[in-house]
Image (cartoon, helix red, strand yellow):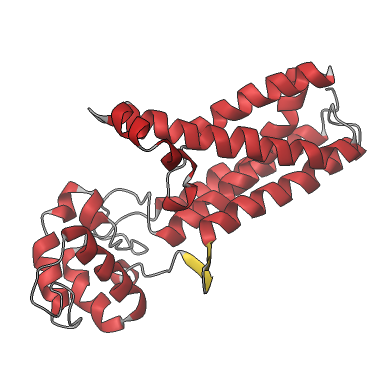
Amino acid sequence: MFATYVHHLDPIALKAGFLTLRWYGLAYLGGFVAGYFLLRYLAQRKMWVLKPEEAGDFIAAAALFGVFIGGRLGYVLFYQILESNHGWQSVMQDPLGILRVWEGGMASHGGILGLVIFTWVYSRRKKVSWTGLGDGLCVVAPVGLFFGRIANFINGELYGRVAPGLAWAMKFPMALRENKIEAGNFTNAADALSAVVPGLLEYPDGRVKASDEIFSGMLQATRSSPEARAALEPYLEPRHPSQLYEAALEGALLFAILWIVRMHHTGC
């Protein structure tokens, strides 16, 4: 039963006019809010190098300068400049594109590097231990990872390897464009889906749509139509929902371990 489940969760939590609220953005917000309360709790018990009243300013600055700026610049550097033959030229031609985070593009390793740099500068200005500052962050970081992996699952991205016969395996439509195994089925899958989704392949005037637009229509159809999911299901491979594994292990379990250890070690 579960091996034939086709992922169809919508990454958009709320859309009202020009306002679009995505689950991934809510995951960031949830991580920062949880981080604030946890770090404040540690500070109140004198188990962190900052004072309780400094936790809010620290989290806000870390979110802006460390996570967002670091994550965005990391994405631009690693995925737009270094991985493309003309990446630097394209960035120079449209430098404001760096600011358009709503179009997607955040690198976790860029965010980590941004946090490392930010905490070093912050510790120098506040004259506190850099490693002591990091101790608190390391304890609460898995909470952010938990929310992030749940958002990855909702987005249908970062799925695992093919897992035939696995009872809880799932099929992810995103694999039709991201993975070589399913990518070979893209044309056949689009043709099959067009039978239940009129206008998927062509405009009303008969012009053929670009593949990106067809794929976007396929995703929208699977999120809203059981018939579309049934038509697409044979062209997808069952895969590990690795986002949920990671949420449980590097998120919930790692946080529990680090929190217990921290509660038994008060040195900063």
Q: Nearer the viewer, residue 216 or 233?
A: 216
The residue most toward the front is 93
Q: Position of residue 83 (x, y in %)?
A: 28, 29
Quadrant position of residue 169: bottom left
Q: Position of residue 38 (x, y in %)?
A: 78, 44
Q: Is residue 158 above or below residue 200?
A: above
At 80% from the left edge and 48% from the top edge, which residue is drawn?
A: 37
Q: Position of residue 93 (x, y in %)?
A: 33, 34
Q: Considering the image in quadrants, where does the C terminus appear?
A: top right
Asked if one can make out residue 83 in the rendered structure from this viewpoint, the answer is: no
- Horizontal side of residue 114 vs 208, given as left or right: right
- Horizontal side of residue 78 vs 196, given as left or right: right
Q: Nearer the viewer, residue 37 or 142?
A: 37
Q: Considering the image in quadrants, where does the N terminus appear?
A: bottom left
At 91% from the left edge and 37% from the top edge, which residue is drawn?
A: 45
Q: Is residue 257 above or below residue 231?
A: above
At 69% from the left edge and 25% from the top edge, which residue is drawn?
A: 119
At 38% from the left edge and 59% from the top edge, which residue is drawn?
A: 156
Quadrant position of residue 35: top right
